[in-house]
Amino acid sequence: MACHDCKNNEGQALAVMIARVDAIIDRVGTSRRFIIPLLQALQDEFGYLPSDALHRVYERTEIDRAQMISVSTFYSQFRHIPYGRHIIKVCTGTACHVKGANNVYDAFRRELNIAEDSVTTGDQKYSIEKIACLGCCALAPVVQIDEKIYGHVQPGRVSEVLDEFEAFSQEQAQEEKKNSTRQAAGEIRLGMENCCQASGTAGIYQAVNEACDELGINVNIKPVSCVGACNQVPLIDVALPDGSIVRYPNVRPEEIKEILLHHFRPASRLRRLKNALLNHIDMFHTDTTWDNILWKSEQERTGAINTFLAGQKRISTEGYGLISPLDIDEYVTRGGFEALRKAVASMGRREVIDMVLQSGLRGRGGGGFPTGRKWKLVAASDRPEKYVICNGDEGDPGAFMDRILLESYPLRVIEGMLIAGYAVGANKGIFYIRAEYPQAVIRVRKAIELCRERNLVGEHIAGSDFSFEISIFEGAGAFVCGEETALLASIEGERGFPRQRPPYPAVEGLFGCPTLINNVETLSQISYIITHGAEEYRRIGTENSKGTKVFALAGKVRHGGLIEVPMGTTLNQIVEEIGGGMEGGERLKAVQTGGPSGGCIPAELCDTEVDFDALTKMGAIMGSGGMVVLGESNCMVDVARYFLSFTCNESCGKCTFCRVGIRRMLDILDKLCAGKAEIADIDKLEELALSVREMALCGLGKTAPNPVLATLKYFREEYEEHVRGFCRAGTCKDMVKLVITDDCVGCTKCAKVCSSDAIPYTPYEKHSIDVAKCVLCGLCMEECQYDAIRKVSLKSEGYGNND
Amino acid sequence: MVITINDKEIEVLEGETLIEVARRAGFEIPSMCYAKGAKHKSSCMVCVVRDSVSGRMFPSCSTYPTDGMRIETDSEEVRRLRILSLELLLSDHRADCEAPCSVVCPKGLDVERVLYLYDAARPAEARALLASVFPLPEVGCDTCKAPCEKACRRGTVDRAVEIRAIIKELAAKEDLLVEVPLESKVDKASFISRLGRFTPTEKEWLKETITTPSRCLHCACSGRSDCKLRRHATGVGIKRPRYEASSLLPVKERIHVRGRMWFEPAKCIRCGLCVYNSEDGFTFRNRGFGMRVVIPEESRVNVNEELAGLCPTGALYLTD
C-alpha cells in the first residue's frame, strides 16, 4: 500500500514538473532556434536540466536528441546534475589567477570538506565551481556565492566569508526594507555594479537607508554608474544642494551616520538634539570612528582617486559617477539621443557611414577592423531584412569593460546601435550578452523599455520613417561565441562552431541575412562621433588608431579599475600615473594585454604608445581591453600555461589544430611547469605554436598561441630555467618548498592554520614543514608575524622572489 | 575564371571548391573530413593548400577559388603542416592498426585473426589460416620464443593470452580438414598506429569486460586497416607521430549502432561527417579537446548503413 502511495506521489511530482515545463515551452516557443533560451528558462526553474523535463521538450518541440546533446553540452552554463542550494563561484580570471585564485578554490573545498570526485557538499548545501571571470578584477581574488560577491578573498578568509554569507542569507529571509519617499536635501551616490557590490556597497546602501531613517534626513540615495576606481570602493559621493560634491572612498557602514550628519540637518530640532547627543556618545564610546576619513584632509582623502581619474578621457564612459544608468531624462539632458535625432532627421544613411568612416573608428572587440567599412558592407546589400548585433559576449578572463558599459551606460550603447541600424538600413537589433552578467541583462532590458516609451525604439523612431526593434539574447557560457560566426550559430540554436569566412556576416549573417556585428564599446563611441563630428574625434588618438580605449586595469597595480584613455597613452603612464604604480613595491615585469589572445609586453617596452598596430607589432593585441599588470613574483611560463589552459577549455573542438594542437602545447607547458621538460621541448612548443597560429580556422585558435609566443620572445630564459628545474618567481609548485627559518619563535600560529597538517604543533620551539604534506597554499606565510616562513627553490639556482 | 595550381593554369567550373578543381586537374590532395556529395564542415586540415599570392594557408575542401590564385598543393610548407595535422590527429587516435602479436610473428602468421576465428567459434577457418604458414599438424611454436606473447597487450592488463597453447589446440583438431589454406597478411609496409598504454582504470575495466574464450583484446583494427588516416599517414611518410597521446578516450569501447554497424569512439577523429549526414542520429557532446561523437540509444534507428562508408577511420564500420 505504501508503495502504491509512493508511486502516486512520484506520478504527481512528474505531472507537476511537466506542467511547469509546458508553461515554459508555451512562453519561449517550440522552434529549434529557441533551444538556448528554452534551456536557460528550464534551468532557472529547476536549478538544472532534469531528464524528465528534457523528455517533455522532445515531445513538444522541434528539438531532437541530437540537437539537445550537442547544444546543452557545448555551453558551460547548462548543468545536467542537481547542484547544492548555494553555488560558490570562484573567479579564475587572469587577475584572480595571478593573485592565487587556485589556492582560494582549494581552500573552499577543504573548508567545506567536498569529496575529491564531487563539486557538492555531502549535505547538498554548497556546490563549488571555477568560473572564467566575474569581471571584478580590481578586487581579486573574487568569489561569488549565489548573487553575493566577495572581493579580496584570500585562502585564510574562506571561513569568514562563509560565515558572513550564512548571516547574510538569514538576514535576507527576514523583513523587507520599507521604501518611504523623502523630500531630498541632497543626494548620496553610490556605485551598485558587481565590483562595488563585491566590496560591500550593499551594506553601505543599507547603512545610508537606516541612518536616514534614524536621523530623519531626507536625501536621495542614487545608485550610479561606475566611477571606475574599483580599488577605492565602497565609494560614495555626497552631492549637496549647491551642486558641490564631496567624495568618500573606502567608506565603512559605521561611518555613514557621521558623514550624513556632517552634511545634512536632521529633521526636527528635538530630534536633532537627541541625535546629536546619541551621536556624541557614539563617538566617545566606539573607537572605530576615531580613525575616520572625515578627519583626513581633502587631499589625503581623494588624492589617489583624482590621480586615477586624471589623464583619462571620457567618451564611452562620459558622465562616469554622475549619471544614473537608467535615468533617461538625465541622459537626454546631458545630450543623450541628440546624435540619433541628428542622424535620422538631418543626415542621409550614406552621410552617417561616411562620418564614421572618416572618424577612423576601429572595432574595439579585438581585431580593429575599421567600423565604417563594416557598415558600408552591410549597407551595400539591398535585402529588406538586416540585423545589427551588439557583441557583449565579453569572455576574456581579466576584462570587464563591456560589463560596466552595459551596466552603467546602457542608453549610450542603445543609441549607438540605433544609429548603426539607421545607417546600414537594418530593422532588428540584438544585444548578445553573456550569461555571467545578469545585472547587465536587467539594465539593458529596462533601458530598451524606457526607450520604447519615448518612441526611441519601435516604429517611426523620433518621428522619422526609421523603425527598429531591439531584443536581448543571453549567451550561455562559451568564450568562442565572441567570434562573430560562432555567435551567430548560437543565436540560431546551434553549437558555437565558427564557420568559414567568406561569406562574411556582413553579406550572409544571421538566418542568412546581412548582419552588422559591433562590439559594445564600438557602439558606445558612435554618438560622440555623430554629435561632435569626425574631425573632432580624429583629434584624439594616434595616426591609425583614433579615439579612446577603455581598459580593465588589474593585477599587481595599486589602483585597478576601469579606465578610458586616448589611444597613444603609454603603458608606463597607465601603470604609474593612473594605476598609482606597482602594488607592494614590486618591480614591473610585464603588462599582459588582450587576454588569452594577447601577449605579455615586457617592462622595457612599456614606454611604447598603445594603439592597435603598436601592440600587434610587439606580439600582443589590443583585444577587448583587459590589461593585467605582472610583477616579479609572476612566473611567465605559468602565465602562458594559464592562458592556454583557458583556451584549451574554451576551444569549440571543431578543427584539428585548435582542438588537439592547443592540448599538445599545454602538455608541453605542463611538463615545463613540473620541471620534467627538455630543451628540445621548447623548440617543439614554438613550432607547434606557430603552426596553430597559421592553421586554426577561427580567431580564437589563431590567436591562442600568442601568450606562448610572446613569452617565448621576451622571457625565453625563464623557459630554459624551468627545464633546469628552477622557477624564479616561485610560482610553480613542483619547484619550490616552504621552509621555516630561525626567526621562528614557536608561536604555533602556522601549525594551527595549516590546512594539510604539514606543520607539527611544537610550542616555543622552531617549527618545521613536512614537504610531503605541504600543499603550498601559503596560509602559514600570511599568518606568521615574524616573517619566518620562506618559499625557496628546490634547486640551488637561487631563491624565490619572496626572499 | 582561371587559377594556377602548381604552375598549371586551370579553368574553374561553377561552384567548385579548390580540392575539386585540383583533383579534376590530376593533383592529389589528401583529405579526411571531406567526402564528395556529403555535407561537411572543414575541420581536419589535412587538405591544406597555400596561396602564394596572399601567403595564406587554407583547407582546400571548403575554399572557393578567387581570380588570380596561385595554389601550391605540395610545397615544403604545405607538406610540413599536412604532416603535423596528421600527427596531431594520430595523437588523439587510440588504436592499433595491426595487432602487436601479428606484427612480431617471425612466421608472418596473422595471430590476431586466428584468435578472432577461435573466439568466433570458427575453428575450421582458424586452422585454414594456420595451414597457410605451418605444415599442419606440425606448428613452429615449440622452438619459437613467442614474441607474440611478449607483445600481447593483454599482458599489460593481467597476463598475456596463451597464444601457443591455443594454436596447438587448433592444430590438434585434425578432424577439421583444411581444404584451401586461408591467406591473411599483416601490412608491415604501411604506417602502423599504436594504441599506447592503458591507464589503471582501463586495465580494471578490460579485465572485467573482455571475457572471450581466448581472452584476446583483438587489438587489430576491426574497421578497415586501410582507412584514410592510415593511408595518408603512410603517404606523407610518418613512421612514428611525434606527439604522445594524453587523451582518455574510452579505449576498446565498441558500441553497437544497429544491424551490422559498430562504432568505436577511441578511433574517431571528430570530423563530423557522420554527424552532419544523419538526421537526429550521431551528434557531438562537449567541446574542445573533450569533444566526442555519440549516438543516443533512441536515435540509433535513425541512421543507415551507408553512413559507415563516410568514416575516414575505422571508428564507424560494418562487420562481415
Image (cartoon, coloured by chain):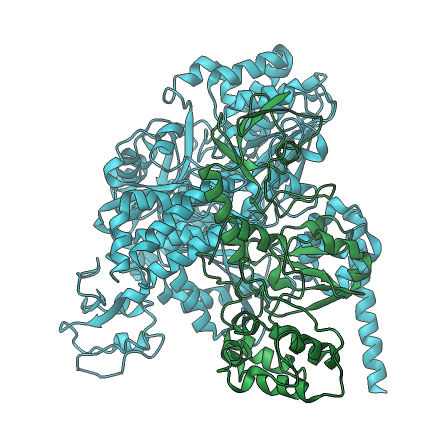
Pinpoint residue B148: horizontal percent, then vertical percent: 53, 77
Observer-nearest residue: B27 or A238?
A: B27
Above or below: residue A30 compared with residue A732: above
| Quarter assignment of residue B256 | bottom right
Pinpoint residue A150: horizontal percent, then vertical percent: 44, 57
Observer-nearest residue: B80 or A170?
A: B80
Chain with colour green in the figure: B
Instruction: Identify the residue shown where x is 17% and y is 82%.
Output: A765
Instruction: Identify the residue shown where x is 58% and y is 63%.
Output: B97
Pinpoint residue A65: horizontal percent, then vertical percent: 75, 57
Q: Quadrant of the N terminus of chain B?
A: top right
Asked whether, in this view, residue B281 is left or right of residue A233, the answer is: right
Observer-nearest residue: A266 or B314?
A: B314
Pinpoint residue A768: horizontal percent, then vertical percent: 22, 78
| Quarter assignment of residue B221 | bottom right
Q: Quadrant of the C terminus of chain B?
A: bottom right
Report which colour depicts chain A: cyan
Which residue is most to the front?
B135
Above or below: residue A527 compared with residue A656: above
On the question of residue A593 being in view, the answer is: yes
